[in-house]
Amino acid sequence: MSAGCVTHGKECIRFKVLHVARKTLAIEVFPDSSVVVKAPVGTALEEVHRRVIRRASWIITQQQYFRQFEPRTPVRQFVGGETHLYLGRQYRLRVGEGFKDSVKLSRGYFLVTTANPGEPETIRQLLDKWYLAKATATFHGSFARCWPYFAKLGLAHPRLQIRRMKKRWGSLSRGGLLTLNTDLIRAPKECIDYVITHELCHLRCHDHGPEYYRLLEKVMPDWERRKHKLELALV
């Protein structure tokens, strides 16, 4: 595998070249913004550069599209007084001392009780556990709302996995594993539905070509509004 770089305006597009046994050259942009060119064996690097330059605008558009899903919430310190999101709403953190660890929502507050109220790491672990439990229930409910349309298309039912992710709010593997970022529980429910629907559309269309957007528009006509709301909510 070799690598290269081309300049398009102010952007520098770095890419890797993989020579494989195929007849045509293909360019793929991945969720982490990396670019891989799959070229027929023997293709000259100059030809690869020409093709990347020709598709530069499309590559940059794809990279910008994926970046919208990158978590952008400022780093939290897990101390009393700061705010934390849950389903699109801000809740102020209030920490108290007690014999039993607990996390509750009450009147606009996250109420955290623990024997170690002065240890931010303890507070973080308690909130993470609470968020995971809420995400598990909420995401399965969201999936149940989104799946019926795709079931009618005769598509295979994907497996659902929930874990913390660094780069994406959601992803769908070729093997049918739908992964959702635990932190998505901070977004409004309609935005969670959007991310799931976005990924489920990849069961039919693997890239973000015209066919993909036609399907997304048909399944969720207001997807752009929901996407914009997600961008505004998780800043």
Image: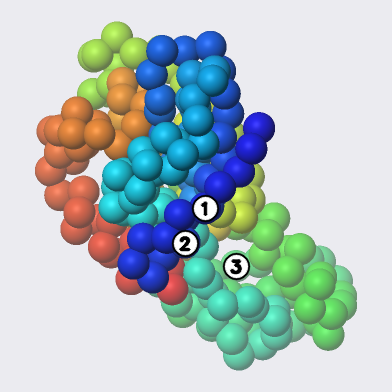
Q: Quadrant of the N terminus?
A: top right
User: Residue 168, image x and y in percent?
Assistant: 51, 50
Residue nearer the viewer, 161 or 202: 202
Left or right, 157 with respect to 93, comes to left
- Labels 1, 3: front one: 1
Mark 1: amino acid: Cys
Can the viewer see residue 178 in this picture?
no
Residue nearer the viewer, 96 or 235: 235
Are there few (<14), some (14-19), or many (20+) residues within 10 Å of tag 2? few
Q: CA distance from mark 1 to mark 2?
A: 7 Å
Mark 2: amino acid: Cys
Q: CA distance from mark 1 to mark 3?
A: 51 Å
Q: CA distance from mark 3 to mark 2?
A: 47 Å
Q: Which residue is tagged 3?
A: 104
Mark 3: amino acid: Lys
Are there few (<14), some (14-19), or many (20+) residues within 10 Å of tag 1? few
Q: Give the residue drawn at x 12%, y 43%.
A: 221
Residue nearer the viewer, 62 or 108: 62
Residue sitting farthest toward the bottom = 81
Q: In what element is the residue under mark 3?
A: strand
User: Residue 54, image x and y in percent?
Assistant: 30, 44
Are there few (<14), some (14-19), or many (20+) residues within 10 Å of tag 3? few
Q: Give the residue drawn at x 42%, y 35%.
A: 47
User: Residue 66, image x and y in percent?
Assistant: 41, 51
Q: Give the residue drawn at x 29%, y 52%.
A: 57
Q: Which residue is tagged 2?
A: 12
Q: In what element is the residue under mark 1?
A: strand
- For residue 5, the mark is 1
**Label 1 or label 3, whichever comes before in sequence order:** 1
